[in-house]
Image (cartoon, rainbow, N blue to C red):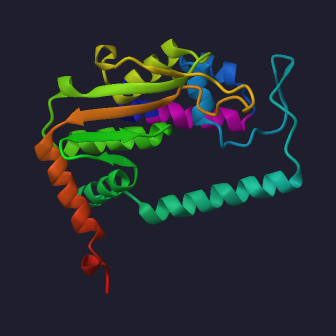
Amino acid sequence: MGYRGKVQQQERARELRAMSWRLTEIAAELGVSKSSVSLWVRDVPCGPIVRRNGHAHGERGPNKLQVAKAEEIARLKAEGAAVIGRLSERDFLIAGTALYAGEGSKTDSKMGFANCDPRMMLFFVIWFRRFFDIDESRIRLLLYLHQGLDLEAAVAFWGQLLEIPHSQFGKPYRAVADPSIRHSKHPLGCPSVRYNSAPISRFVSGLMGGLLDCRNFPG
């Protein structure tokens, strides 16, 4: 499944969640894992209880304050998305450079990017593949995942999303969960995509330098 297909699945999952579908129901409907659905819909307010086939589904309906908040969030998100619009090639190059400047690892010969947000990871990988001549077989993915969480599901999720073969995953780091801390908010862990190339790393360093040079800011 390509990038567009994944986006359509995520959008449909969010629509169903807003209609009070349970996570397990959405996962079954779309043929994906429950953990994937949970990530996609985590900020979607669940609608009031509805009945399907004579059975109640969903959760307790939101109160007026929750409804107002949800409407405001939806409105402002839509306005923000409209301001950004469709990215041009130059927009995408600059946006990816800014993302890497903030989140990427900076060494002379290695590119590295780690984040728990699937959207951030997908953005980086698409940007990296689009603007640089890379050898796909040299991409590596390392996964940080607490013990007790489903490693197989995490590997399957990130491998499919980022289109990186499981054979190119390094040995995962299984951190010991701290019982004094509430359950992990990242059931699929934190992936780190790595690529060794001194020329690409140095060129990206030049992109970041140009981006952060105050002389290039609007007057």
**The quarter of the displayed image where residue 73 is located:** bottom right
85 over 3 or under it: above or below = below
Residue 171 in the image: state x and y as whole percent. Answer: 38, 17
- Residue at image position (21%, 53%) is 204
Q: Is most of the magenta stretch helix, strand or loop?
A: helix
125 over 155 or under it: above or below = below
- Residue at image position (45%, 40%) is 115
Residue 155 in the image: state x and y as whole percent. Answer: 44, 18
**Within the magenta stretch, is there residue 10?**
yes
Residue 64 in the image: state x and y as whole percent. Answer: 87, 54
What residue span does the magenta drawing correspond to?
7-19
26 over 46 or under it: above or below = above
Q: Which quadrant would the N terminus be assigned to in this image?
A: top left
**The quarter of the displayed image where residue 217 is located:** bottom left
Name the side, left or right, on which 137 lies relative to 17: left
**The quarter of the displayed image where residue 185 is located:** top right
Name the side, left or right, on which 55 lies relative to 46: right
Q: Which quadrant would the C terminus be assigned to in this image?
A: bottom left
- Residue at image position (52%, 62%) is 80
Residue at the extreme bottom: 219
- Residue at image position (43%, 43%) is 120
**Within the magenta stretch, is there residue 88?**
no
20 over 152 or under it: above or below = below
Residue 35 in the image: state x and y as whole percent. Answer: 59, 23
How many numbered marks are there?
0
